[in-house]
Image (cartoon, rainbow, N blue to C red):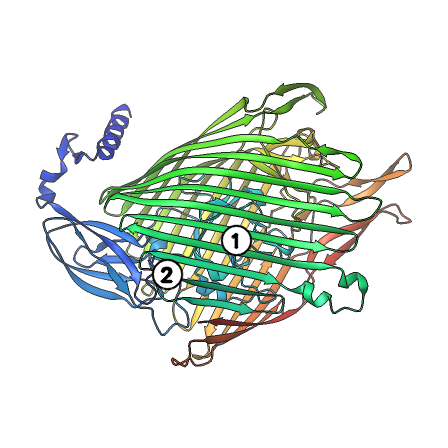
Amino acid sequence: MNNYFFKATLLAFLVIADSGTLMSKNNHVLNTETDSENTKRKSEISGVIKDTETGMAISGVNIYITELRSGTSTNSNGEFSVALPQGKFTFRVSCVGYKTKTEQVIVPPSSVKKNFGLESDTQLDEVVVYANKKDQNITRTEMGVEKLSIGQIRKMPSLMGEVDIIKAIQLLPGVQATSEGGSGYSVRGGSADQNLILLDNATVYNASHMFGFFSVFNNDVVNNVELYKGDLPMKYGGRLSSLLDVQLKDDYTGKVRGTGGIGLISSRLMMEGGIGKNTSWMVGGRRSYADLFLKLSSDKALRESSIYFYDLNAKITHRFSSTDRLSLNTYLGKDNFGSSVGQFNYGNRVASLTWGHGFNENLYSSLSLNTTNYHYTLQSKMSDSKVKWKSDITDVTLRWDLDHSVSDILKLTYGASSTYHNFNPGLITRPDYPDYKMPLYHALEHGVYLSAEHNLVKNLTVRYGLRLSAFQNMGSITSYSYGANHEVSDSTYYGSGKVYHTYYALEPRVGMVYKLTDNSSVKANYARNTQFIQLANSSSSGSPLDLWFPCSPNVKPQKVDMVSTGYFHNFNKNEYETSVEVYYKKMNNVIDFADHAQLLLNSKLEGEIRIGTGKAYGVEFMVRKNTGKLTGFLNYTLSRSERTIPEINKGKTYLSPYDKTHCVNLSLSYELSKKWNISANWVYSTGNPTTYPTGRFEVNGEYFPIYSGRNEYRRTDYHRLDLSANYVPKHNPKRFWTGEWNFSLYNAYGHKNPWIITYDQNTPSGVPDAKMTYLFGAVPSITYNFKF
């Protein structure tokens, strides 16, 4: 074991130093340049693959070298690099949504640049913006990675005509919506706050508009979408369950063009173009207009009301050279609900500045500075109670990531990040009264990582790495200590900038893929994730009153250890994809809240927290059809999610609020003709666990409910059918404007799926009466989409 560890350590240091040395079968150090199997010196062939029409770099393109029966794929910037011996080779360049290109490439004695251009497949009504290597589900080492192209998402039925990325990922195996119509989601039994959402590397804390009915992502401005279910890339940390990585469009330097849509509830517009050959820009906006129709009402109260949301995206990218690019992305979004008696608004502000630099063909660096702010304001306009409540969370993050292609068989990623967190739980102002200010929380979160992907033998690739994280609580603040009954026993004041507590976490992650045949593989992985901040929100119905708070001396960071394995098989030249994945998650330091907990405006919130353990396990089945007139997928998830917290439910294990035993998702799209395309989604899941009041007791004339065991009951099963039809008129090449119509029907057969449950305490029997609130019946919509 020690000898093996020595050899593995020596190998890592040698390849990082790029010394060209490897361990031979006889345990001697050999120079790879004189190895008998590599008598020819290899040359580096590198380049960029772009869309010939738009000039945009294409990620995920498959470059297959026929003579070697192997290849590579482009990164997120459309770049590729491969080392080959001298000679003539056939490059087969392919990508979903583009015509396959085959070209003979002569490899000279020295490194050379070779770029490719791909033409869009005119047989498709829309180019798939996010292109995947066709057999990537077989070859990549990560498990639980899900991708949906923007083209696929746009064909899906939508709620009120708003194409929604988050609604689309809720159809994937292991992912469930936390409420009817909401944008919150649970991944493999985790809570909604255990999902990291990134917009061009910047965190988005609340991804919802209109209390969760729509998401903050305007599909017209999005380029890439990728969901990781637990097995996160090593460079990311801070969440237990998943990563949703959303990348915006850039790199288009052609003539000004645009896309947009006009729907029943909102409209949107995106425009992009170039400034010279090296600078691209993109601007997109969206706004709802329910408030404009309210002004037509005969009711004065409605005329004085306002209900709307908007968001704005802007991005500019400049290429200084073939190896240097700088991009700036900004997002601004807001929801507003107002009436004559009060006003409520919430929103996000996000910005990211990224510098990408290629040191050489084998080493690429990305340095980024990101900031994000989520805020909400609740204000009363009544003359006798003009109260205003503000709350927000702000992050500033600096991160440096490097991708290092050491050789054909070894690729490294390494880097570091540091985040400053500022939590403002609440500030209440009122005329003629002193302000009530909740204590601010300040913290620093750091991470360094190293990960390797190593092709050990012909069909076996292993990915292994380690992430070291640290979390530091900072003053100024008064830190409380709590006794056995969760009452304050002592307090200590720490001055501004004083680090008064630090947590460290080691997060090893290991994965492997073994190709059984060209069309099938088995995978396995282990991952440990740590989460240092969490959310206090007693509602699962999409309330934006989110209160994020950090771990502290009283609240330990949450941790999860997850193991998973799976079998993957493609059929008929990757036209069909099938997979079975099994996972098990063990969670430590998970939190829940005491009965009748006061979560908002509570400076002693830590006294309401109860800590314990949890576990989640399940199996996910997936069948996907990628090409042909009929495309889509069918998946089924069988799962369990439990919590055990000594001070809740009398210490007995109970179901988490996100447990759904059975979940089925069917999404199909069929091309009737060149003009008509129809789509359907059908969703079924077991109802969420819930806690019902079973009685009441009286204290000083006030009634308080008596609850059943925690999550002892279930809501009724959830199911819904959505239908959609897209009509695309024949394109006239002489016209600069093209349009299409989308007709959607959400919840087609009008099933009553419960949204929230309220209780009437004043019943003759004293037993509270439950009342279900059903949000949607059948909801039709029509949208006109256009591009120019």
Residue displayed at 75% across by 37% down? 596
Type of the residue with mark 2: Gly
Q: Are marks 2 and 1 in contact (CB under 8 Å)?
A: no
Task: Answer left or right for 522 relative to 323.
Answer: right
Q: CA distance from mark 2 to mark 1?
A: 45 Å
Q: Quadrant of the N terminus?
A: top left
Residue 664 image offset from top left, x and y in percent: 55, 58
Residue 122 image offset from top left, x and y in percent: 35, 73
**Crowding at mark 2 (Cα within 10 Å: few <14, some 14-19, many 20+):** many
Residue displayed at 28% across by 56% down? 518
Q: Which residue is mark 2?
A: 274
Residue 601 image offset from top left, x and y in percent: 71, 36
- Residue 637 badge: 1
Q: Nearer the viewer, mark 2 or mark 1?
A: 2
Residue 101 image offset from top left, x and y in percent: 24, 66
Type of the residue with mark 1: Thr
> Residue 675: in sight, yes or no?
yes
